[in-house]
Amino acid sequence: MTVLHLKGVSRVHGTGENAVHALVDADLTIKEGELVAIMGPSGSGKSTLLNLAGGLDAPTSGEVLVEGTVLASLNKKKLAALRRRSVGYVFQDYNLVPSLTAAENAALPLELDGLAAGKARKLALAALEEVGLDVKQADRFPDEISGGQAQRVAIARALIGDRRLVLADEPTGALDSATGEEVLKLLRRRVDAGAAGLLVTHDARHAGWADRVVFLRDGRIVDSSAPLAGAETLLEGAA
């Protein structure tokens, strides 16, 4: 089943001579159980594509569909509900709420969706355990845990509930190599369980965890290939 479908999607910032074409006529389909890596030089449109895929931004033209629903057809309330229930985000800088504990951060999407605090906490603790965070860290605040632990909390928040689409923007950029590999294993495991994943990365080794690699240049998708060898070749071509 197709989870994410971008149909001729473009995003233009500004008008006239000052117009910046951040993404141009992008076509991309990701099915359940599939992890796709997005690679390309800085400014190639990777983050723009990710933001459009998750409904954080709207395309200038074209359509973005999540499980068959055209995001542009939803009002703000329905779009926010879809993001809370179906889309999980993992950011490089974690984006945790500093005044909330690890468990409260993980439970936040469920509570915003109206789930009782007690039930949300129970599911949050299970999600934290799933990502390998010691239960002793659950009631600590973001500034009281390590970067690797904070990223695990961010992943737990992204995966909690029945998230069908997981979007990860350079999720290993601030981590050491060993912790980064663990993060990718977690993403791969969730995708293998039936979610669809979109991973923005600059590292061909990390792209090796994906089923295929899509390469962007100047806002355009220029190629799609198998991981590792294909990604390395494309990076060499962009050098």
Image (cartoon, helix red, strand yellow):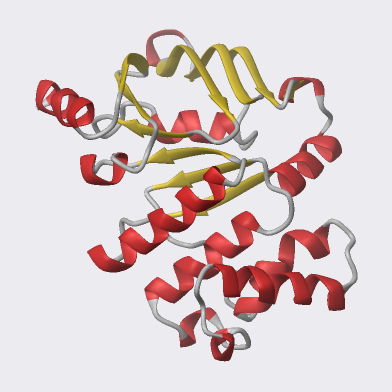
Quadrant assignment, res 100: bottom right
**At 59% from the left edge and 47% from the top edge, which residue is drawn?**
193
Q: Is residue 156 above or below residue 229?
A: below
User: How many marks overall?
Assistant: 0
Which of 146 and 97 lies nearest the eye of the viewer? 146
**At 85% from the left edge and 78% from the top edge, which residue is drawn?**
118
> Is residue 60 rendered to the left or right of residue 114?
left
Give coordinates of residue 227: x percent, y percent: 28, 32
Give coordinates of residue 97: x percent, y percent: 60, 70
Which of 115 and 72 lies nearest the eye of the viewer? 115
* Furthest residue toward bottom: 136
Q: Is residue 182 above or below residue 169?
A: below
Camera sees residue 8: yes
Quadrant of the image containing the C terminus:
top left
Q: Is residue 29 above or below residue 175?
A: above
Give coordinates of residue 12: x percent, y percent: 49, 17
* Furthest residue toward front: 193
Give coordinates of residue 1: x percent, y percent: 66, 24
Quadrant assignment, res 220: top left
> Is residue 121 rendered to the left or right of residue 10?
right
**At 72% from the left edge and 27% from the top edge, which residue is drawn?**
67
Camera sees residue 59: no
**At 31% from the left edge and 26% from the top edge, which residue is drawn?**
44
